[in-house]
Image: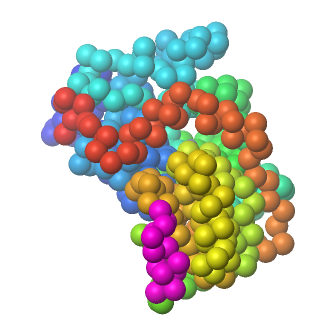
Amino acid sequence: MTDRPPPEPGGATVDAIAALRRLSRDIGRDRTLTQAAGGNTSLKQDGILWVKASGTWLAEAETRDIFVPVRIAPLLEALRTGDARAEKATDFVASELSDSALRPSIETAVHAAMPQPVVLHVHCVNTIARAALDDGEARITRRLTEAGLAGRFAYIPYCRPGVPLARQIARIASERIDIVVLGNHGLIVAGTDIADAARRLDVVVAALAIPPRPTSELSETAALSELAAGTPYRLPGDATAHHLARDPDSFRVARAGPLYPDHVIFLGEMVATVTPKKAAMAEFLASWQAAPGDAPSLLLVQGAGVLVHERLTAGGEALVGCLVDVAARIPADAALNPLTTDDIHHLTHWEAETYRQTLDRPGAAAPGPGAA
Ligand SMILES: [Zn+2]
């Protein structure tokens, strides 16, 4: 190769970073793989981990500078010794390589703990629809084994993202394990290069795929609009959302309690239900009169459709879509395994998530001074 681009500072070649950006954009545009600022990708080169910045969207990977360079060795040492700085990883940013003012992903230590050069972490709805079940591990083990992937994958029961999850990853990490399924969370796939990781992601998603129950768009929304008139609720941006209240099996899933972390972060811990009557709506609103700011983001109008709170952000809208896609894939007879009260508490009292939420507010996503 005579026309190979010169290395960037830190050794990441321009073509490897460009390939990471392209794949990240493609993953970010697929709502069955990532939603909003969820999911993250990384590339390791010459001791530096180029990892997605917290609060940024993978879909923006080619239009905005979303990757932050982080020194791997001191981060892994911090993870190993229980140094609290491993959580935010901001102290390990190689700031001489980037002008970005953004923080590394909340899952940076997870990426560092995998030895492979490329790591893709996705909130794949096909994976979540299995990994949120009581017998999720058995179902996933069976599917991946049938796909010829025995010995290549590990299953980690739910633990809080960030350092607790990175510690579990570190326990199982090896060159041989390039697929890690995360209970009540998603999927990690690794590879020797971008193309290798991308191929493996396709193979695993195909192995775990579940045909969704058909989601019919609701054509007539006048009655729902009328129910919402004069209230802080509105119709959702995504017309498929109504399926959550109209399909009894999806309705069961939506009411079971949060099944994965980003549901808690972007939609809150409670999904409310009302019957499609003005009196029921009035009673519901009255019950939140003392604390209107805490009123649920997602309101299922039983048998009729869905309303969302007017404060719902673009991230929240994307997580409504995720719930639609997950719920439509969960069989009617499957026992669900929602997050526990403790799990939810640890998510909502985690500073790194509070920061990520601030970037989800309108006008808050200010790129760093050097951002493209
Ligand atoms: Zn995640």
Residue at (66, 74) in percent of width and height: 280
Q: Extreme left residue here?
A: 3
Q: Extreme bottom residue here?
A: 220
Q: Can residue 123 be seen here?
A: no
Image coloring type: rainbow
Q: Can residue 335 be seen here?
A: yes
Percent coordinates x, y for residue 113 in the rendering: 58, 27
Quadrant of the image containing the C terminus: top left
Residue at (84, 62) in percent of width and height: 335
Viewer-proximal residue among 58 and 254: 254
77 in the magenta segment: no
Check the image and report above or below for 242 versus 15. below
For the magenta stretch, what is the residue range? 222-235
Quadrant of the image containing the N terminus: top left
Does 364 sit left or right of 197 as displayed? Answer: left
Check the image and report above or below for 84 versus 100. above
229 in the magenta segment: yes
